[in-house]
Amino acid sequence: MNQIAELTEQPLEQVDVSDPMIFKRDAFRSVFERLRREAPVHYCADSAFGPYWSVTRFHDIMDVDKNHHDFSSQGGVSIGNRSADFEAPNFISMDPPKHDLQRKAVTGVVAPMNLAKLEPVIRGRAAAILDTLPSQEVFNWVDHVSIELTTQMLATIFDFPFEQRRKLTEWSDLATSSVATGGTMPDEDRREGLMTCLSEFTDLWNERIHWDPAEHNDLITLMANSPATANMDPMEYLGNLILLIVGGNDTTRNSISGGVYGLNQYPSEYEKLRQNPGLIPTMIPEIIRWQTPLTHMRRIAKHDVVFRDQNIKAGDKVVMWYVSGNRDETAIDDPERFQIDRANPRHHLSFGFGIHRCMGNRLAEMQLRVLWEEIMARFDQVEVMGEPVRVASNFVRGISELPVQLHRKASRRSQ
């Protein structure tokens, strides 16, 4: 019996869903279905990341996510603990009032007026990327499209040197590949890379202290000129940079890849899309639900609390498994199915709830919508030619390779 199969049959008290290989093998479904059924608030006493509680049902996750009075974000949001000598706090790992002030300082970049300005930029870049893709050969969609489009957008909202934009992807991967999130990168290597990130962004900060945020709406200028963030110490600045880079990278990048894979897994849905591209706005939140780019968020119990008849002690880790809640049969009809015309497609957990709801959710949805509009204008199908290579992480549900081949529309084959 293999290790993954054992999780559905071993005693409940021995079940540990934090093993990154569960997600590398895309083998999480059966064990989370078991927990939702038998122990929706489940205690694991022994794991590589210490003891923790798992919350696995949709509405229970929502209740924890919205309850910052009992469940604190202090100390980080992944199941692992940060290294004591390398703490980089950020506003998502803070409670009010500091969280609210720092979050407000950067929300201008995703304000509706700014999103309206960004849409034609995204469309132009998506079109340019798609028009240069290889024809009649298999290539890695993740590298050519998912990473490239996402990184171009990140460079724009940071006003980062465009020709160096792939550094942003490297730093995002560094931030989420540590041992503390189920990855394999040694802390020393990760620390060195992230300190390089801090150094380069400090140079940008020092330049933009003198910029007028009314004229420059990038994230660095907004932080450098807001009273809530202007006096951050270097490690807090780094923490917020990591948060914004990962938040702007992983959701979109892995949803771009996951959407292509989902349509290929469900050919009838792809045919629906071909017959009616007007379904794209409904398809986008379904992609984000079905992929669930971040598998979980963690909280810490601020005091002893009884939750769903379980006695959670002060200081206990409480892990909200979004990847399970998005497949909760009691909250979502036929949740394993990828269905692009769901009646209530935004009924999902991928962006979180309450004060920590992802501030870039509309930007992510807009990028995906614009990309798929441009894809459908050019291609009858983006055909998956092999199984995806998935990331070994219990935090990011990522895809590193997705081999595809393009089938261009007849009207564009001569172009």
Image (tube, rainbow, N blue to C red):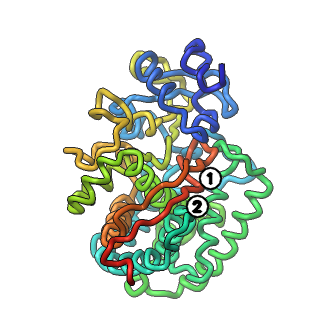
Residue 202 occupies quadrant: bottom right
The residue wearing badge 2 is 242
The residue at the point 44 percent across, 39 percent down is 322
Identify residue type, mark 1. Thr
**Pick the front one: 341 or 139:** 139
The residue at the point 61 percent across, 72 percent down is 166
Q: Residue 8 location, x and y as percent?
A: 54, 19
Identify residue type, mark 2. Ile
Does 271 sit above or below residue 113?
A: above
- Give the structural element (helix, strand or loop) at label 2: helix
Of callouts 2 and 1, which one flags the residue occurring earlier in the amino acid sequence?
1
- Give the structural element (helix, strand or loop) at label 1: helix
Residue 68 occupies quadrant: top left
Q: Left or right: where does residue 318 sit relative to residue 288?
A: right
Q: Left or right: where does residue 250 sit relative to residue 361?
A: right
Q: Quadrant of the C terminus?
A: bottom left
Q: Left or right: where does residue 103 sit relative to residue 170?
A: left
Q: Residue 355 location, x and y as percent?
A: 37, 49
The residue wearing badge 1 is 176
Does 41 sit above or below residue 111?
A: above
Q: Residues within 10 Å of mark 2 (few under 14, many from 20)?
A: many
**Pick the front one: 150 or 278:** 278
| Marks 2 and 1 close (CB-CB < 8 Å) | no
Is residue 193 at least partly visible in the picture? Answer: yes
